[in-house]
Amino acid sequence: MTTPTDATFSVPPEIRPMIEAAASRLVDEFDGVFSPEAIRRAAAESYRSFAGARSTSLIPLFVERFTRQRLRALARVEGKVTYDAPLVVFLCVHNAGRSQMAAGWLQHLAGDGAEVFSGGSNPGTEVNPAAIETMAEIGIDISAQFPKPWTDEIVRAADAVVTMGCGDACPVFPGVRYLDWELEDPAGRSAEEVRPIRDEIGRRVRGLMGQLGIPERSGSQG
């Protein structure tokens, strides 16, 4: 994980206390794994990924969740922490449709049996409303998700990386298992047009779970 040498960064005054509180929670969470300085630098770097987000009120939440994902991945890569659940990463261009739906499917079906991340080579500003709508129809809520970039440590830590149309922009690391799914892009499509894409993604996620030995949690539907 690359971190700036200077942890200072420009945050609007109205959200600065929330960003600082998020960083403090992460310092407590990763106590003994990473230094407070490294965690705060990671939070500063993560903030820059969302400085242009439409909903500034959600930026502190995005920063905390993204930084947590990055730190957990780095802990895996460096062998500082061992997690039982496999990490599956879904990558596309904008992280607004296909990869978000795939991540939603896997988290819903696997529960704590898998750790899930989705990211984009050129993240959009919001998740596709049609993707949110059609996933909600089958009881999967991705409305709180957000487009974000991938980072090297997250991809390196993955047990499987699924790419969806990001082409040469997708990162490649030796020893990482890659799968490429050719899927229609839901961008600009109606909910009616997105439903078959949603269902195909669900079918493929179930197949991937079988390949990785991830059990479907009892009571999951979709």
Image: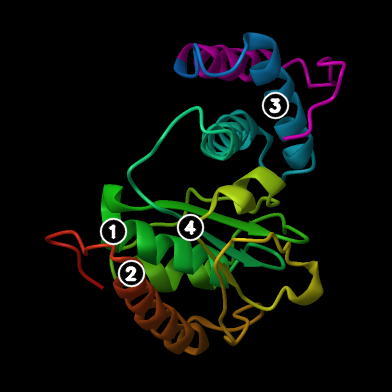
**Pointers 1 and 2 in contact (CB under 8 A)?**
yes
Which mark identifies residue 159? 4
On screen, residue 206 versus residue 156, left or right, reads left
Residue 191, compared with residue 100, is above or below; it is below
Q: CA distance from mark 1 to mark 3?
A: 28 Å
Which mark identifies residue 110? 1
Q: Residues within 10 Å of mark 1 (few under 14, many from 20)?
A: many
Q: CA distance from mark 1 to mark 4?
A: 15 Å
Secondary structure under the numbered disc 1 in the rendered image? helix
Q: Is residue 10 magenta?
A: yes
Q: CA distance from mark 4 to mark 3?
A: 23 Å
Q: Residue at x 55, y 83 (%)?
A: 190
Which amino acid type is shown beneath numbered disc 1?
Ala
- In the displayed orientation, state which residue is furthest to the left: 218
Which amino acid type is shown beneath numbered disc 4?
Asp
Q: Nearer the viewer, mark 2 or mark 3?
A: 2
Q: Earlier in the sequence, mark 2 or mark 3?
A: 3
Which mark identifies residue 209? 2
Residues rendered magenta in the picture: 1-28
Secondary structure under the numbered disc 3 in the rendered image? helix
Q: Nearer the viewer, mark 1 or mark 4?
A: 4
